[in-house]
Image: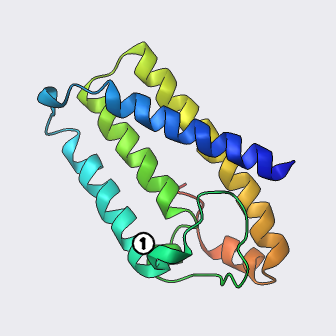
Amino acid sequence: MKQEVGGILVAGQFILLALLAATTNWHALSLLALPFLIASLLLAGWAVKVMRLGHFNILPTIRDGAILVTHGPYRYIRHPMYASLLLAGVGLLLISCTWLRLAAFLALWLVLYCKLRIEEKLLADHFPDYARYQKRSRMLFPWF
């Protein structure tokens, strides 16, 4: 059941991201949006470098042989890839914000939040040190 929910959440995540990207008027790219888009790419790149590309899992599951990564961006936040997607979403909204795009971004935030809540439970069940890691790090952003 949880795998089915995870698959639905992943599909929703990609559909919402595609909707935001496809409805963006890239010719209207503003200087206000640029820092969010750049920060998103830098954070995602840092997370990929630290986690190593082959160890990512888009489904909210624990892979066999998984290790708890707590360095790099993971030292400060537990879900840097989700944070990078949200930063990109804010950047895309700043390029052009309509009610539909705002609704898509809020739905994306909700989907990612549901995914990370599932992951948090799985990680806490799998890694004995996860509760201690949760106390010294934030979920998505250093201030949140």
- Residue at 30 percent across and 58 percent down: it is 41
Residue 84 appears in the figure: yes
- Residue at 79 percent across and 65 percent down: it is 122
- Residue at 38 percent across and 47 percent down: it is 87
Where is residue 21 shown, x and y percent of the image?
34, 34
Viewed as shown, does residue 135 lie left or right of 54?
right
Where is residue 34 shown, x and y percent of the image?
20, 45
The quarter holding residue 95 reads top left
Above or below, comparing residue 39 to residue 46 in the picture: above
The quarter holding residue 60 reads bottom right
Above or below, comparing residue 44 to residue 132 in the picture: above
Which image quarter holds the C terminus?
bottom right
Where is residue 82 shown, x and y percent of the image?
51, 54
Query: Which of the pair 128/4 is nearer the observer?
Result: 4
Colouring convention used in this rendered image of the protein: rainbow
Query: Which of the pair 17/132 is nearer the observer?
Result: 17
The furthest residue to the top: 99
Given the image, on which type of amino acid does mark 1 rest?
Val
Secondary structure state at the residue bearing disc 1 = helix
Where is residue 22 shown, x and y percent of the image?
33, 28
Above or below, comparing residue 118 to residue 86 in the picture: below
Crowd rating for badge 1 (residues with CA inside 10 Å; few <14, some 14–19, many 20+): some
Q: Which residue is mark 1?
A: 48
Q: How many marks?
A: 1
Query: Which of the pair 25/31 is nearer the observer?
Result: 25
Residue 141 appears in the figure: no
- Residue at 55 percent across and 76 percent down: it is 55
